[in-house]
Image (cartoon, grey):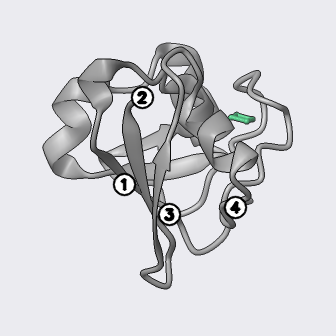
Amino acid sequence: MPTIIYIEHNGTKHEIDVRSGNSVMEGAIKHNIPGIDADCGGACACATCHVYVDPEWFEKTGGPSVMEESMLDFAQDVEPTSRLSCQIRVSDDLDGLIVRLPENQH
Ligand code: FES
């Protein structure tokens, strides 16, 4: 199972095995990682699952879709590697993916 590394804003690191096909958001919610709210349950309609993809990984995850990009407008402190984690599908290719969590989800 691919391992996803979630780093909280305070630096706390969580290495979590996430089943392929699940989203990066689902992996966090199932393991009670603080810092991802996911109010809409993964429908790309809330922007409270905002994460920063590690720049080294951004080519592999790819950038946001047009719909995701318009939702990201509602997130705070958006950066060039910002993504909505419900829209990143876990696969073997993403084994070792590092995402950083923002200070707040709004
Ligand atoms: Fe709502 Fe990702 S969980 S946009």
- C-alpha span from label 1 to label 3: 6 Å
User: Can you tell me which quadrant of the image ligand 1 is in?
Assistant: top right
Tally the marks: 4
**Residue at left offset 38%, top offset 32%:** 2
- Location of residue 46 (image quadrant): top right
Q: Earlier in the sequence, mark 3 or mark 4?
A: 3
Residue 105 is tagged as 4
Label 3 or label 2, whichever lies nearer to me, is 2
Q: Position of residue 105 (x, y in %)?
A: 69, 61
- C-alpha span from label 3 to label 4: 10 Å
Q: Secondary structure at mark 3?
A: loop
Instruction: Identify whether 78 is placed above or below 61.
Output: below
Q: Position of residue 21 (x, y in %)?
A: 54, 14
The residue that mark 2 highlights is 1
Q: Secondary structure at mark 2?
A: loop
Q: Amino acid at mark 4?
A: Gln
Q: Earlier in the sequence, mark 3 or mark 2?
A: 2
- C-alpha span from label 1 to label 4: 14 Å
**Residue at left offset 73%, top offset 44%:** 30
The residue that mark 1 highlights is 79
Label 2 or label 1, whichever lies nearer to me, is 2
CB within 8 Å, label 1 to label 3: yes
CB within 8 Å, label 2 to label 4: no
Q: Secondary structure at mark 4?
A: loop
Q: Amino acid at mark 2?
A: Met
- C-alpha span from label 3 to label 2: 31 Å
Would residue 80 appear left or right of 46 to someone viewing this image? left
